[in-house]
Amino acid sequence: MMSLAFMRNLIGLLTLTTILPGAAAAQSEGEDYIKLLGSLAAIASPPNYTSIQGAGSGGVAPAGYVFASASGTTDETDGGVNGLDGSLTLGAGLGSFGGVETQAVVNITSTYPDADFANSGSFGLKLGTTMDTSDQPIKIGLSLNNLGGWGDSSGIDVTTILAASSNVTRYIANGNLSYAWTLGVKSTSGDSSGFAGLSLGLSDAVSFSTAYDTRLETLKLGVGMKVDEIISFALTANDPFDMGAAKGVTLTASFASKLF
Amino acid sequence: MIFKAYTLVLALAVPGVTLAGTVIIDTPEPPTVSTMVTLEATLATVTPIAAVGAVVTEALETLQSAEPGTPEAVEAVAIIATNIAVPSNLTPLQVQAAANILMALIATTPKSSPSRVALQRQLSQLQ
């Protein structure tokens, strides 16, 4: 069986034959030309920043990328103190194995710095691949959360999330329009729900997003802000329209950088 | 750096309060990833074009070290773009899409750059 990497190389080779002067024509010659031109434009003029809050994505951190996110929320979850809750996630992209990208994370759910820090938490694994299309590539990811929990997080059922997402930039006469979307399903102990999210890039550093969860039947609204290429923040309003879920605000700070 | 980000969010969101409980994070994708992946994919696609000349080879080398969006990257992209053969059988929609992208490239390329003229020529041919 041909690996995904081999298929990607094959597609890349076919692409080249269409763009090189004098090369044989191919069915998707025009599409490939537009895609390549779009990619070059994205390097010359990077797309606006997009970030979806409140919904999982299909993206997997590339090999050697490490990231950390810290969140605090006021919503009425089943943990926390005085209506406040928080957690910390550390992760890294481990690279491709048989054409499947992998990412490992550690979720720390007890985050009081001096007393119970890291007394409870769990591991997670994400597998993903990128599907080439005639338009923008679609990233597909399978997340397995709550693997091997400890402390208060031990014994929690594994949550499986399958998501597809894509970042899209359309060039128009006066500039570009950048947006990202995600669609997926989440399942814990046979209890499944769907989710969808959409983000609109407002500038090269600020984005707006909305997400919907079919189980909670609520919307989340978020604003993402990229400070630089390493640090970003996100502010999410949970159930701002009082649709019946836990209301509150979540602030997340994220760090991401290629370290190895 | 990790400690700095963590400390900052605690200071803003949960001063002096014990934190424990549910995982609430949907970890955002690293901001740099999309651009990096685009760059790597583009280089992988374009690199064999280097066979057409030293100018493109040099532009590709520049792209591998230049930060996206910098004048160096803009110039290198313009050089590469003008060395890509325009397919003759584009649909009207594809012509419009390509024209929009070329206009975006022209807008980012300095007026003094010879590549800007080449891009404008390519746009004229396209239309």
Image (cartoon, rainbow, N blue to C red):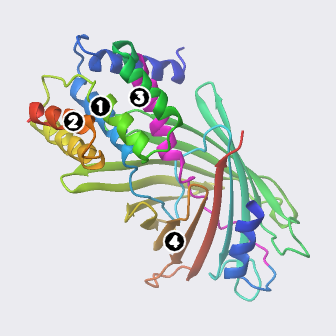
Measure the alpha-carbon separation of dots 3 and 4: 51 Å
Image coordinates of residue B91 in percent, x first then y, are: 12, 32
Query: Which quadrant of the structure image shows residue A93?
Result: top right
- At a point 38% along the width and 12% down the height, the residue shown is B51
Coordinates of residue B118 in the picture (x, y in percent): 21, 32
Q: Which residue is mark 3?
A: B59
Q: Amino acid at mark 3?
A: Ala
Please say if A202 is above or below A237: above
Camera-nearest label, 1 or 3: 3
Residue A51 locus on image (x, y percent): 48, 60
- Residue drawn at (46%, 31%) of the image: B41
Would residue A145 be visible to someone looking at this image?
A: yes
Instruction: Pick whichever of labels 1 and 3 is earlier in the sequence.
Output: 3
The residue indicated by pointer 4 is A216
Query: Between marks 3 and 2, how big is the CA–CA gap?
Result: 15 Å
Q: Residue furthest bottom?
A: A82
Please say if the residues under marks 1 and 3 sit with CB atoms less than 8 Å apart: no
Q: Amino acid at mark 2?
A: Leu
Real-space Cα separation, disc 1 to disc 2, in angstroms = 8 Å
* Element under disc 1: helix
**Is circle 4 on the same chain as circle 1?**
no
Same chain check for tags 2 and 4: no
Dot placed on the residue nearer the N-terminal end, 1 or 2? 1
- In the rendered structure, which segment of residues is drawn in magenta? B19-48
Mark 2 or 4: the one toward you: 2
Residue behind mark 2? B119
Q: Are marks 3 and 4 on the same chain?
A: no
Instruction: Identify the chain of the residue marked 4, using the numbered disc in the image.
Output: A
Q: Position of residue A157 (x, y in %)?
A: 73, 57
Q: Residue at x 40, y 45 (%)?
A: B71
Q: Which image quarter is the C terminus of chain A in?
A: top right
